[in-house]
Amino acid sequence: MKDMLKSAGAEYDYILVDLPPILPVVDVKASANSFDAFVLVVEWGTTAAGEIVKAVDTSPLLSERLLGVVLNKADEVIMRRFEGYSDRRYSYYSDEKLPSEAA
């Protein structure tokens, strides 16, 4: 695996590797040294917040190299409930226009 990643790294700027879930399988922890960074994929409505924290805390190397999280299968209708008054669609909540829209 290390030789394959090294060979691919000589030809490509980025190499994406799809790994199994962090908690139930040890593959991620065992191979963590082989990767420069990680992106955690979390399924909307299925993965509990505590599981996410536990997954990141299982390996200091993983948490140090974590670039971010992808929220998969998100429910857009429910996500709209989390939009605040200061977001880009302020006019949705008020008849007032933003300064950039006044012109």
Image (tube, rainbow, N blue to C red):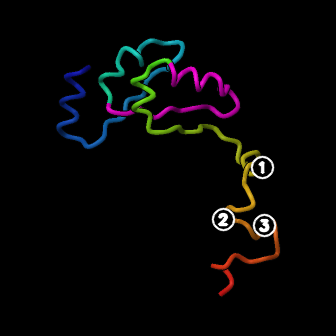
Which region of the structure is painted magenta?
36-57
What SS does tag 1 mark?
Answer: helix
Instruction: Check residue 46 for magenta coloring.
Output: yes
Instruction: Check residue 45 for magenta coloring.
Output: yes
Residue under label 1? 81
Q: Residues within 10 Å of mark 2 (few under 14, many from 20)?
A: few
What SS does tag 3 mark?
Answer: helix
| Quadrant location of the C terminus in the rendered image | bottom right
Q: Identify the image quadrant of residue 75.
A: top right
Q: Identify the image quadrant of residue 18.
A: top left
What is the count of numbered marks? Answer: 3
Residue under label 2? 88
Residue type, numbered disc 2: Arg
86 versus 58 height, above or below: below
Q: CA distance from mark 2 to mark 3?
A: 9 Å
Residue 97 x, y percent position in the rendering: 74, 77
Q: Nearer the viewer, residue 11 or 91?
A: 91
Q: CB under 8 Å between callouts 2 and 3?
A: no
Query: Relative to 3, is 46 on the left or the right?
Result: right
Residue under label 3? 92
Q: Residues within 10 Å of mark 1 (few under 14, many from 20)?
A: few
What SS does tag 2 mark?
Answer: loop
Residue 82 x, y percent position in the rendering: 74, 49
Lower position in the chain sequence, tag 3 or tag 1: 1
Residue type, numbered disc 3: Tyr
Residue 88 x, y percent position in the rendering: 66, 65
78 versus 43 height, above or below: below
Q: Residue at x 76, y 70 (%)?
A: 91
Residue type, numbered disc 1: Arg
Residue 99 x, y percent position in the rendering: 66, 79
